[in-house]
Amino acid sequence: MIADWQRTFAEWLWSARWQQRPFLVAFPVLALRLVIAVTRDLREGYLSLRATSLVYTTLLSLAPLLAICFSVLKGIGAHNQIEPFLLQLLEPLGEQGRDIAERIVSFVDNIQVGVLGAVGVALLVYSVVALMHKIESAFNDIWHVAATRRFAQRFRDYLSVLLIGPLFMFLSVGMTASLKHAAALQSWLDIDLIGTAVGKVFLIVPYFLFGLAFAAIYMLMPNTRVRVMPALIAGFITGILWKVLGHFFGVFVTGSASYAAIYSAFAALILFMIWIYVGWLVVLAGASICYYLQNPSNQSISRREAHVSLRMREKMALQSCAEIGHAFYRQGHGMTLTRLSARQHVPALMIEDILDRLVDAGILALTAGRQPQYIPGRPFEETTVGGMLAALRAADEDAMPAGKRVRSLGPVQRILDKADAMTEKALGGITLKDLALEEEEG
């Protein structure tokens, strides 16, 4: 009975009819979908695993990262902003956070970049680039992107972020500090901000700055195109979560006298590592929100459920080729992944894997631009349905190492060859263009 109720609820929740409803009517259901999808990612442990890995890398690369930021800020005369920034970041740790910030700043001060030499500076930069590469890998995993940036591209993009990031850090800390002291604004405006609506508005500025910072991270770090609106929404949600969890973590630290009794001098380090883990988990959950906002069709499917039967893969491949052929020959354009997903009522994650294999086989091609479209990779009137199915079944066979290929038994191979021959005989006279035009008439 419970299984039947769950099935009925899932059919109601993930029904395609919600896309046709007015936004205000569908918004509660769409928000519930997003919460369920992100909660599922957290429960399955992928985000937690990535956050744990980033804690270790952050501890190793924190001092070199701050040393580079210190050098950039020193060039503009704002190097004294590192300690206020760390104090703001470690505010949930209370007095222990202040002690940790002072120790980190002392470590950074002891790093003399001028006496390190070429090798030392290269290792310093490499440790920071390695941290950012691991962050990119975590974001690419969330976005289901297999390819990372090329080596030269990493230095270009990462160092650009490292040069621009300290400037935003200076502005963020400076603006937040200025807003906490309203005397200057009071003298300019000749009004008392305390107790007025203007003063209330200024209280949200730290959240706004954090939201913009997270939105920039979500747009720049994944090796794929991220649209502005999903990044902004996810950034502001992450900023609010960061502040709220920081408040609760501060309450936890205040009442964690038992940690100090158990771990003694290591208590501050343990709490510091826990806060770094919580912070990275919040950032990665925000990246998951951004991904699902940009790809809402994938909200209904888990990573563990992304695999489908061979028969279903062939069905989706045939339908995709028919849709693409119809759009190309009758309307003069291709089909986007989002459009194909909506037409077939299938998560884009399932279709994309199939289309990638057809692109590798040369049957389809992907255009460039802000919204890539799938078009015929070769004339569909020269490509049979049987040939397309054979190419789909043979995908990734050449990628197997020669020593790891499955040994072929004679009788088994003869049966497979006979099945391929019968398929080609039955479907060899039907081209993909015929299928596309027949699909239009049907």
Image (cartoon, helix red, strand yellow):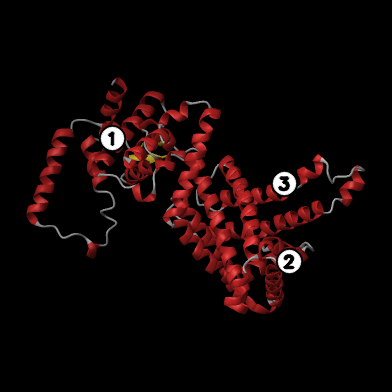
Q: Nearer the viewer, mark 1 or mark 3?
A: 3
Q: Quadrant of residue 384?
A: top left
Q: Earlier in the sequence, mark 2 or mark 3?
A: 2
Measured as percent of width and height from the top left, residue 371 is found at: 49, 37
User: Could you say which is closer to the camera, residue 158 or residue 86?
Assistant: 86
Residues packed near mark 2 inside 10 Å, few (<14), some (14 to 19) or many (20 plus): some
Marks 2, 1: nearer the viewer? 2
Lower sequence index among marks 1 and 3 = 3
Please rate how many residues cluster around mark 1, counting C-alpha atoms within 10 Å: few if below 14, some from 14 to 19, many from 20: some
Q: Which structural element holds mark 2?
A: helix
Q: Are marks 1 and 3 in contact (CB under 8 Å)?
A: no
Identify which amino acid the numbered label 1 is placed on.
Leu
Kindly indicate whether the residue at mark 1 contacts the one at mark 2 (C-beta within 8 angstroms).
Answer: no
Measure the alpha-carbon separation of dots 1 and 3: 52 Å
Return the mark for residue 83. 2
Residue 318 is labelled as 1
- Who's the residue at 12% across and 39% down the image? 422
Residue where numbered disc 3 is placed? 204
**Rendered location of residue 60, percent (x, y):** 57, 71
Residue 341 is marked as none
